[in-house]
Amino acid sequence: MPLPPAPSKRAALLSPDAYNLKAADDPFDLADTLDQPQPVAAPAPRVETTVTALTPKTGRRSPQSRTRKSPPTDRPSAPTKAEGTATVVALPVVQPTEARIEKSRQDLPAVAEKASTPSPVASNRRRSPGRPNGAGLSRLFVLDTNVLLHDPMSLFRFEEHDIFLPMIVLEELDGHKKGMTEVARNGRQTSRTLDALAAQQGGDMTRGLKLSATGHQTARGLLFFQTEPLDNQLPSSLPQGKADNQILGVVHALRDKHPLREVILVSKDINMRVKARALGLAAEDYQNDKTLDDGELLYAGALALPQDFWTRQSKTIESWQSGSHTFYRVSGPAVGQFYINQFVYFEAPGEPSLYARVTEIRDKTAVLKTLKDFTHLKNAVWGVTSRNREQNFALNLLMDPEIDFVTLAGTAGTGKTLMALASGLTQVLDDRRYTEIIMTRATVSVGEDIGFLPGTEEEKMGPWMGALDDNLEFLAKGDGGNAGEWGRAATNELIRSRIKVKSMNFMRGRTFMNKYVIIDEAQNLTPKQMKTLITRAGPGTKIICMGNLAQIDTPYLTEGSSGLTFAVDRFKGWPHGGHITLARGERSRLADFASEVL
């Protein structure tokens, strides 16, 4: 059979209006078509048919050839060759390129907004701009009760993903709402948040509640409640009445009900996560409360300058003198690592050392200010001198009136409490900069509780303030308190009259004016408790937070989620705050050796 003649004109294209009308009628049909590979029709040479038309710009096929609703038998037959009509040879179906598919997916949300609300738990056509699973679906997180009691705002921390709350979780929340503890307050706040979400206008629990309805725009997912019994198939050896096992059963049932979607249990309970993984269920810890993933990344407050620092700065450095301090204006790539009030030091054999603090950063230049040498006896603070580099840095922060907030981290025996008390006594009794010292700490016991303590608030706090008594005993001695007129004449009673011991339980609503506040054992505080204490500061008040991140005794707190880590990271670079990590212990050779080998 001879080949037909060449076409005399181009084939007609599908009009854009007709294509948009089809997309508006069935918006998700386009998404399903893009997600699934299209079969390539085998070329049929020598058969007369019409050319498959491509739409402008996107390269999509017309609905007659791409939609699954139109079987091949419904396609119009090839027109007969008539006058004014050209007959062409059939060509292989042209598949859209990856770039065109991506452009089509970018245009998809505008069409999907007109669609109806997705099904209750799994929305198979909902896009996930974050970390979708293999099928392109958003994840479904089942929250344990301890997550909501730990962070009431955890409902809004999962971005575009959806949240499912089993009925047993609501039952446990109801059981924790009474009392004045932090857990009870979090439980009541969570209940109020759930009530506000459930009362949103136009909300339907069976179809999912928008988490962004209460103003949290970062939460783009949906909240689902358990509105029907779910068939779980857990092993019969697990007690069915236990709350943890009921939650595991819900996760198992959701996974079977929605096999195309990733269902994940989120719990702060380690044993709960272990049991879930033993049953083949996905489980994760709640990570949003962690300031840092690794404690090694914590801001140290000090930075060693490179060995070629002076060589690089020899032509561009500026220096001037102001009082007893020397200032240097430096530039170069090292400036990008600086923070305000960060300490920098240069130590090299045969060259003069430099110990300075960053006081100003502008563009690619920084100003360094040399430090006061507290290792010398003439600069002793209430008879206390620094014994190493980090202690010298700490005393410069503690004695600077322009620094309102100081955090000290370090292992046992590094001198945190002694330096804080010595600096406070000097500025309260000698310099009259503050009126009194207020000291508090987190009352978390290492072992078993000894029961109720008798006496007043200060007497009840006495057993927790052993570190205060030990350091005051040293500072009140003649050889420890010879710095100034008050140091020689003060007795132990006079010193104690300027020190108030307060409990953290009664801090809410207070305002400290011109006070020197010491918060000991700050590693046992949650970020919320740390915020409550720091916001008590009034005009002229200085707050010092001290702690050892290796000695956390509060349940569910880690080095990454501790309030001390939270404060160090948030105040990093603030012009009126400073931090230093004390590295070397100075208590005794026995304590130093024990901290290394035990």
Image (cartoon, rainbow, N blue to C red):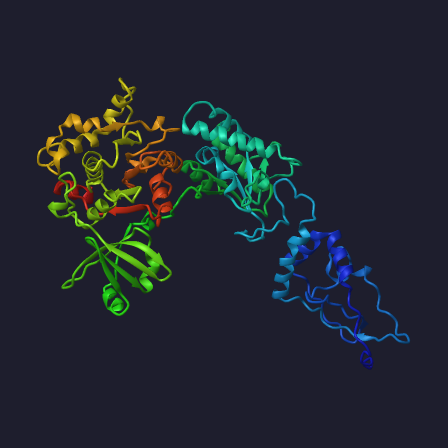
* Residue that sits furthest to the top in the current view: 454
Up/down of 450 relative to 438, above or below: above
Q: Residue at x 58, y 53 (%)?
A: 136
Q: Quadrant of residue 13?
A: bottom right
Find residue 247 and report its horizontal and vertical position in percent.
51, 34
Instruction: Please name whichever residue, 15 or 379, is drawn nearer the observer in this view of the structure.
Output: 379
Q: Quadrant of the N terminus?
A: bottom right
120 above or below 75?
above
Residue at x 19%, y 34% (from the top left corner)? 429
Residue 50 visible to an observer of this rendering: yes
| 498 sits to left or right of 543 | left
Q: Is residue 230 visible?
A: no
Q: Position of residue 407 (x, y in %)?
A: 29, 42
Residue 495's place in the image compared with 381, above or below, is above
The answer to whether residue 334 is left or right of residue 97 is left
Query: In front here: 584 or 445?
Result: 584
Q: Is residue 133 left or right of residue 6?
A: left
